């Protein structure tokens, strides 16, 4: 329930919304710019501004049973139909957008150069983590992967976002980079394409151009057990 405006325009910083339901610190709106936690990307934070002038911090956003739930820092006695303004913490969102797009480029380069799938990931404002399955951890080889990813970023390609029926999308090689399979209930996939570099199903927020991302820098490489490797990286 509710229009997910962040899927249509990742650069939209605020919107006017109507309260659908409220229970204590949890609020459901008819439309929102707040991204709910998912896919390794943290939720947005920000504030809700009531027509009365009251301000509430949005400290977490999650999706449950198809509804986006905004968790506030204090109880809000909103009645259904009340009007509010949503305002996200833009600088935080933008850093996550840059990091998410960088993760797509690095993941695609890993897939192309090493044939590995990401088994786990977590984005943060200042760094990101990839877990992946690989028998041997050759640091020079991995540094070369990062170098090639940075060459792609420097190319400045423009991203494209569109929807495809699941059956059609799954015919695209590598469209699902994560090792886990998408739930069968998802019949239409949102596709994020970086022409010539990557194309995959994705529900997160991204920058418009690779020119906005910066450079990937390896922070740490770890062995996490048999065939389980981890990389931490940041942007400069």
Image: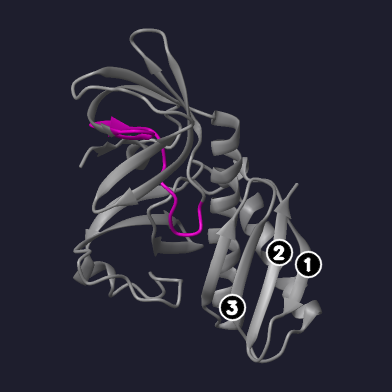
Looking at the image, tell me whether mark 2 or mark 1 is earlier in sequence order: 1
Which one is in front, 61 or 155? 61
Image coordinates for residue 151, horizontal then vertical, percent: 68, 58
Q: Residues within 10 Å of mark 2 (few under 14, many from 20)?
A: some
Q: Is residue 50 magenta?
A: no
Image coordinates for residue 64, horizontal then vertical, percent: 30, 52
The secondary structure that most of the magenta stretch takes on is loop
For label 2, the SS is strand
224 shown above or below 176: below
Image coordinates for residue 133, horizontal then vertical, percent: 58, 84
The structure residue drawn at horizontal position 42% and vertical position 13%, both measured from the top left corner, is 54
Q: Is residue 27 magenta?
A: yes
For label 3, the SS is strand
Q: Residues within 10 Å of mark 3 (few under 14, many from 20)?
A: many
Tell me, for residue 220, which label it has, or none.
1
The structure residue drawn at horizontal position 59% and vertical position 36%, both measured from the top left corner, is 92
185 shown above or below 67: below
Q: Which residue is mark 3?
A: 132
For label 1, the SS is strand
Q: Are marks 1 and 3 in contact (CB under 8 Å)?
A: no
Q: Which residues are magenta?
A: 23-41
C-alpha span from label 2 to label 1: 5 Å
Query: Relative to residue 159, is residue 138 drawn left or right?
Result: right
Q: Which residue is mark 2?
A: 232
Image coordinates for residue 171, horizontal then vertical, percent: 28, 75
The structure residue drawn at horizontal position 64% and vertical position 45%, both measured from the top left corner, is 125
Query: Relative to residue 16, is residue 206 drawn left or right?
Result: right
Quarter-of-image position of residue 106? bottom right
Which one is in front, 28 or 129? 28
Query: Relative to residue 150, is residue 52 drawn left or right?
Result: left
Q: Are marks 2 and 1 in contact (CB under 8 Å)?
A: yes
């Amino acid at each position: 329930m509710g229009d997910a405006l962040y899927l249509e325009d990742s650069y939209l910083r605020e919107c006017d919304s109507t309260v659908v339901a409220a229970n204590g610190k949890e609020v459901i709106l008819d439309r929102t710019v707040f991204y709910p936690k998912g896919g390794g990307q943290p939720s947005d934070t920000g504030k809700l501004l009531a027509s009365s002038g009251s301000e509430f911090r949005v400290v977490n956003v999650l999706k449950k049973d198809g509804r986006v739930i905004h968790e506030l820092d204090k109880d809000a006695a909103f009645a259904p139909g009340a009007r509010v303004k949503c305002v996200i913490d833009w600088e935080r969102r933008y850093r996550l957008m840059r990091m998410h797009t960088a993760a797509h480029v690095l993941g695609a380069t890993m897939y192309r150069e090493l044939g590995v799938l990401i088994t786990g990931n977590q984005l943060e404002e200042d760094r990101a983590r990839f877990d992946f399955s690989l028998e041997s951890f050759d640091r020079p080889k991995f540094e070369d992967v990062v170098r090639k990813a940075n060459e792609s970023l420097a190319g400045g390609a423009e991203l494209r976002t569109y929807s495809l029926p699941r059956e059609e999308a799954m015919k695209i090689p590598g469209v699902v980079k994560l090792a886990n399979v998408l739930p069968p209930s998802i019949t239409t996939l949102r596709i994020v394409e970086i022409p010539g570099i990557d194309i995959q199903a994705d529900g997160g927020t991204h920058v418009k151009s690779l020119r906005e991302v910066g450079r990937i820098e390896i922070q740490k490489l770890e062995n996490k057990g048999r065939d389980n490797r981890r990389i931490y990286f940041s942007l400069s």
